[in-house]
Amino acid sequence: MTPSGLVTWPEDRVTAYRLRGHWRGRTLGSLVTSWADCYGSEVAVVDDRRQLTYLDLAAEVDVLAERLLGLGLRPGDSIVVQLPNCAEFVVLMLACARVGVVPTMMLTAHREHELTHIARHVTAKAIAVPGRVHGYDHQALARRVAADCDDLRHVLVAGEGVEPGHVDLRKLMSPDSQTWERRNRLDALAPDASDVALFLLSGGTTGVPKVIPRTHNDYEYAARHSARVCGFDRSTVYLVALPAAHTFPLGSPGLLGTLMNGGRVVLVPSPRPEVAFEAIATHRVTVAAAVPAVVQRWIESSESAEWDLSSLRLLQVGGSRLSRELAMRIRPALRCALQQVYGMSEGLLNFTRLDDPAEAVVSTQGRPMSADDEIRIVDEHGRQVEDGDAGELLVRGPTTIPGYFRVPEHNAECFTADGWYHTGDIVRRHSSGNLVVESRVKDVINRGGEKIHAEEIEDVLNRMPQVARAAAVAAPHRELSEVVCACVVLEAGQSITLEEIRDYFDASGMAAFKFPERLEVLDEMPLTPVGKIRKQSLRELAAGMRTLRQVEEVGA
Ligand code: OOB
């Protein structure tokens, strides 16, 4: 059973995707048992506490699935999942899939503002958190969120010191003897493959939360087919160093694509070079996924590192634009092949292919995974541009959602009547046939791969008593590519510092990666003739290209 408020694909495309064998009618939960049958005592999942074979994984998934039902959770109910990279994350996500409970994937960096907003939007019945991470008390956070969300009844904790009233997730998943009866019972309860398997988040949590419902059918296809494109097989040892809740390491092909092929998933809590390199050396990792900001640090550290990285065959890079210059340094420094991944949680996945010419691999962001991904590159009037010209990318296909969850008015803006999703990315087609991402039209700041909606930052800035009017734009940053720049006009007689702004964001319960890192105090907001804030002028100002006076003169 799927939660209401869901936009579904039109019947003709459903039929086509089934007939072509993309959508197989298999739920993610049902895969776990077939993996156990195929790969049995091979190691499936490794984290810093333990390792699980495929048989262990299936046993824990089944036990947890049944106990989730025992807590009163029902098919279609959602659990907000805020777990770091650990085996419990994998077991919980698959246990949910086994019985049709829907995990909503949040980041450990998220705080009260994000968690409460999203928990309410999906009517979450439970929240899963770690104990402490870097000294931060997630149980206290979960308690505050639960107090603000009427439907949220259970706090599940994967960690030490589980507090009274909270549920110990590790105990909940510890298997008794695995019985065929349980397996059969759960098989009989399996959800429909066209139901929602998980909710992903798109960047911000503005007034209109963009929660992305991914069905079993489409997510299973994305992971399975992308694993084929990326050459995953039984020898694949895949490193999850980015947050596992992000669709890149989760299902593009990520940990799911690895498990589907009988490979091994290694989870580490952070992409820091010393942590990732130790895991690569210890577990003989063959494939890793990273964002450009992480690649930069890995390359810099590889020169002085004493770790043996010789097992690494493929580095997948995506999430934000990889410069050609950085791309060129990957093979000499890390001695592995590069694959660029231009994807989106909304579904479409583009990859450079393993046999693409070297030039296309370093200078393009790849092409769609599926032969049935339809793409159009259009100008501002929605007309197709000349081949090779830049325009906005529109897409529809077997992995691209037909709408966000419970936001009909917003869907009318982001999707055309005939189902094309406006990606907001400006792309052009390269002579190789691959796509190059040039810029974007949507008002998003891409901080090292984390997407931040400008509007969300502006809402907080505008609440500050010192601020008369505010705008948030991207300021360029050498490593992270972009950071948040707050542009403010002050109330008469007021002053403000970046420190004060950051403290205010902290007190508002915002995730730290959204805190402004640059501040421009302006006498007046540059406006367009219709009175909208002229963001382009502010971006140029934040880039230190011109003074505002010059910008106004030029841009008037
Ligand atoms: C991935 O997913 P999201 O949902 O966090 O962000 C999607 C947006 C894209 O629309 C684009 O603006 C940007 O992130 N992006 C890239 C890129 N990959 C994503 N921009 C330039 N170059 C790239 N290679 O970021 C995501 C999802 C699945 C796989 C990989 C990344």
Image: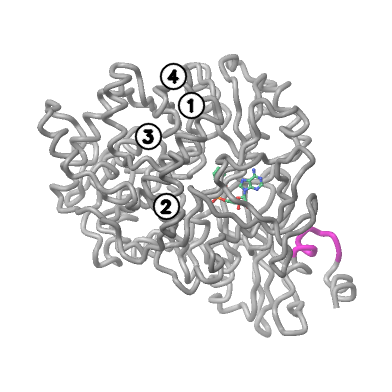
Residue at screen point 25% across, 58% down:
125
| Residue under numbered circle 3 | 86
Residue that badge 4 annotates: 234
Residue 14 is tagged as 2
Of label 2 and label 3, which has the lower sequence position?
2
Q: Are marks 1 and 2 in contact (CB under 8 Å)?
A: no
Left or right position of 406 against 322: left
Q: Position of residue 105 (x, y in %)?
A: 40, 49
Please state which of the two labelled residues, at mark 4 or mark 3, is closer to the viewer: 4
* Amino acid under disc 3: Cys
User: Are there few (<14), some (14-19), or many (20+) residues within 10 Å of tag 2?
Assistant: some
**Residue 43 appears in which quarter of the rendering?**
top left
The residues bearing labels 4 and 3 have C-alpha atoms spaced at a distance of: 21 Å
Q: How packed is label 3: few (under 14 Cα within 10 Å), some, or many (20 or more)?
A: many
Report if residue 79 is visible in the image: yes
Q: Earlier in the sequence, mark 1 or mark 2?
A: 2
Residue identified by numbered label 1: 238
Q: Secondary structure at mark 1?
A: strand
Tell me the CA gap for discs 1 and 2: 32 Å
| Percent position of residue 297, x then y | 65, 33
User: Does any atom of ligand 1 lie closer than 8 Å to the CB of label 1?
Assistant: no
Q: Between marks 1 and 3, how big is the CA–CA gap?
A: 14 Å
What's the distance in space between the residues labelled 4 and 2, CA to CA?
Answer: 31 Å
Seen from the viewer's position, the closer of residues 526 and 365 is 365
Foreground pick, 469 / 280: 280
Q: Mark 4 belongs to which amino acid?
A: Arg
